[in-house]
Amino acid sequence: MGIVTKPNSKTILNMKKYFIASLAFMALTASCNNNTWDVTSDLTVDASDPTVGLTPLAQQQGMDNAPLYWSVYGALRQQEKEKSFPNIFTTADWDKAIEYVATNLKPYGYDMLVTDGFASMSGDNGYMTRYSRTKKDEGSPEVELADIVAKLKAKGLKLGVYDSPFWLHYTNPDAVIPGTDGITVGSLRYNPATDTNVLHPTKNDKFGWVVTDHPGAEQFFEGFFKHYSDMGVKFIRIDFLSWYEDGMNYSDQIDRGYGRERYVKGLQWINKYAQKYGVYVSLVMPHLKNNAIIEQYAGNMVRIDADVLEGSWYRFSDNNRGTLRGGWPNSENAFDGFVNWSKISGRQKVRLDGDFIRIESFASDDEKMSAVSLPLMAGGPIAVTDMPTGDNLKFFQNAEILALQKDGFVGQPLTRNLWNADGQIWYGQMKDGSWVIGLFNREQAIATRTLDLSRIGLAGNWNIRDLWKHTDEGVVNGKLEAQIPIHGCKIVKLTKSN
């Protein structure tokens, strides 16, 4: 049997390029401006309830907050644009990034640096132990993950990884899967002679996938989480899930597609072993079928929009606004994704991930405040990428707005509407009983946002605190109203007045 690994850096880059190019000609469905949006409520996808016996990951102790972290995404994405292959993130790059985060972000609660998929990922016996070449040379050595973990630990920081138990990383196909009686990692790959029920058998897979009904697959999944837990990694981003489930990317057939049953089985194991080993799971590129019935249990977070790419307000709010699809990506912009999928999120529920924030791509301070505020109002993560400085850095250092993440806050829009003002007014309650209100403006003109407090069950007098201006603004009774600049927001905290 030949050597099978997760694709090398060139293959990964080609997949990323294909994914990006497909944005230009995708076939979209179900555009609407009402509340009949449950386009993923296909109740026929599961023969039986796949969550029986499972407990959502978010209900585990210490798992009910979205993280604050920094990602290598921006640096590697830039190298891809420059076509300076292979993309690399060297030990010197790690040293620089660690110092940047320790100095500028850690004091505000950011405690983790996370890898991404644009660089080489390899290991010997089934699991990744190395990440990125050390030089612009495919033959150069790779950086040992254990060394990066040690560097981060010395600064009081943690490593998160981009990897998947559905992927195979090995140079030795005869390596025995832990916990089995001689079953090898090579035996988990697709076998055309026996795996006759894949959806598209004539397609060539882009990944070395684990076929979850092969003997030893469950033990391989458990070994994946134990491997990272033993290394000190407690955060994993699991990507390209739609490609495994049915091989689809937008309207394009990419991989063979291993079917709903195999996909669900894998996510059930993720739920089981992430809990056993205390790992926080971020699910990326899921179809979220049947209203994310299985993803709500198998993930602490789920991605709810297309990739950020170069960022900008267009990617955040305008890209195919109001258009929802029945598969990945359900929404083409983060704002629509947060509004639509607010139906599944909450405290001790799955968190919504709007992807990285490329703060320098936004055209104004108002846009930058909105890009940071909406994920926090929705209970999602703040994922910094690039290395913003000066005025751009300050948007990630607002302790008053970041207090929402520390609290575990999860808000919701007045209504799940992608066009009218109610979908741009968010609210939720802090653990101390105070309320946080977010008034947003997605439009191309200054707009008035008005909230009758009775709509969220509030009466009497409330003290107002603006969380971006850091000022007290008196008392409100009955109605909160403000002029919101183009693409801007106003985030206020209401505390009961004596």
Image (cartoon, rainbow, N blue to C red):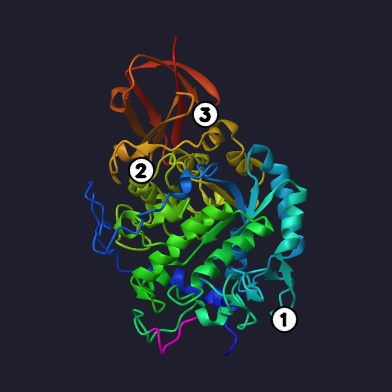
Image point 58% across, 89% down: which residue? Answer: 2
Q: Quadrant of residue 476?
A: top left
Q: Quadrant of the C terminus?
A: top left
**Near-viewer residue (234 or 401):** 234
Q: Quadrant of the N terminus?
A: bottom right
Image point 65% across, 53% down: which residue? Answer: 113
Query: Which residue is under mark 1?
Result: 139
Residues at badges 1 and 2 in contact (C-beta under 8 Å)?
Answer: no
Q: Is residue 215 visible?
A: yes
Q: Viewer-nearest of labels 3 and 1? A: 1
Sequence-wise first label, 3 or 1:
1
**Near-viewer residue (397 or 163):** 163
Query: Which residue is under mark 3?
Result: 467
Query: Which residue is under mark 2?
Result: 443
Magenta segment: does it hold 193? yes
Compared with 424, 234 (above or below) is below
Compared with 330, 218 (above or below) is below
